Image: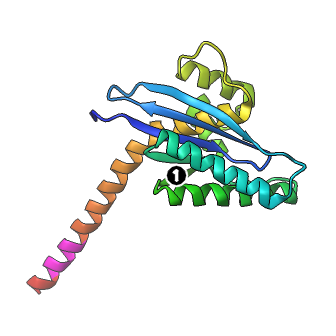
Amino acid sequence: MSTKTTTVLGIDPGLDRTGWAILTRDARSVLSLVACGLIHTDAGQELPQRLEYVHREMQKILQTYVPDQVAMEQNYFLKRAQTMANTVMTRGVIILACQQAGKPITFYSPKRVKLMICGTGTADKKQVQRMVQLTLNLDKVINPDDTADAAAIGICHLKTALLNSMLNVKAAFLEKLKAAQAAQIKKVK
């Protein structure tokens, strides 16, 4: 069991509203919400100013809370091409801010987050909000839903990242073992 507290920044990206949440997992694997919020851009501003604002606010969050890792919602198909393009650009400035801060990013599909949090990949927003509330032992649900989604993404990461890391180490070890065995067989011949 790790004695280190892990801090993760969960992000639900969007040009109009980007939800964010800082969560921790302590040595006993207890999850806690440290802070959460919403980066809201003014629809009346030009796109470059809105993207710059998201980038600047993300830099402030990264500098203030210094998370160990970042978890962000993976893009999924949206019906409106303009909304999709704006979300992709917003994700780009967020990824840039994380890269500049030297923070690794893991991406999760909305379905995977819902499955991890609620037990079904088709859960609705209210179910996700309620399960986030219960998981973090909060007095009330997190609002707005973009912020609750960011917390859900962070919870998903904190619950799965350690196992994924161990599986990756095991896979790398098995690959090296296989290569060593192949080299040993060549020496024998």
- Residue 108 place in picture, x, y as percent: 58, 48
Comparing 106 with 189, the one in front is 106
Q: Is residue 52 left or right of residue 167?
A: right
Q: Residue reaching furthest left?
A: 188
The answer to whether residue 116 is magenta is no
Q: Is residue 139 left or right of residue 186?
A: right
| Residue 47 image-quadrant placement | bottom right
From this view, report whether residue 37 is shown above or below residue 73.
above
Q: How many numbered discs?
A: 1
Residue 85 in sight here: no
Comparing 136 with 97, the one in front is 97
Q: Residue at x 46, y 41 (%)?
A: 160
Which region shows up in magenta? Answer: 179-185
Q: Secondary structure at mark 1?
A: strand
Q: Residue at x 32, y 29 (%)?
A: 27
From this view, report whether residue 156 is shown above or below residue 170.
above
From this view, report whether residue 179 is shown above or below residue 5.
below
Q: Residue reaching furthest right?
A: 44
Comparing 47 with 187, the one in front is 47
Could you tell me what secondary structure mostly forms the magenta stretch? helix
Image quarter (top left, top right, bottom left or bottom right) of the C terminus: bottom left
| Residue 187 image-quadrant placement | bottom left
Q: Mark 1 — residue? A: 106
- Residue 131 place in picture, x, y as percent: 61, 23
Image quarter (top left, top right, bottom left or bottom right) of the N terminus: top left
Q: Residue at x 9, y 83 (%)?
A: 188
- Residue 70 place in picture, x, y as percent: 52, 47
Q: Is residue 172 left or right of residue 109?
A: left
Q: Residue at x 61, y 48 (%)?
A: 58
The answer to whether residue 181 is magenta is yes
Label 1 is placed on what type of residue?
A: Thr
- Residue 93 place in picture, x, y as percent: 66, 58
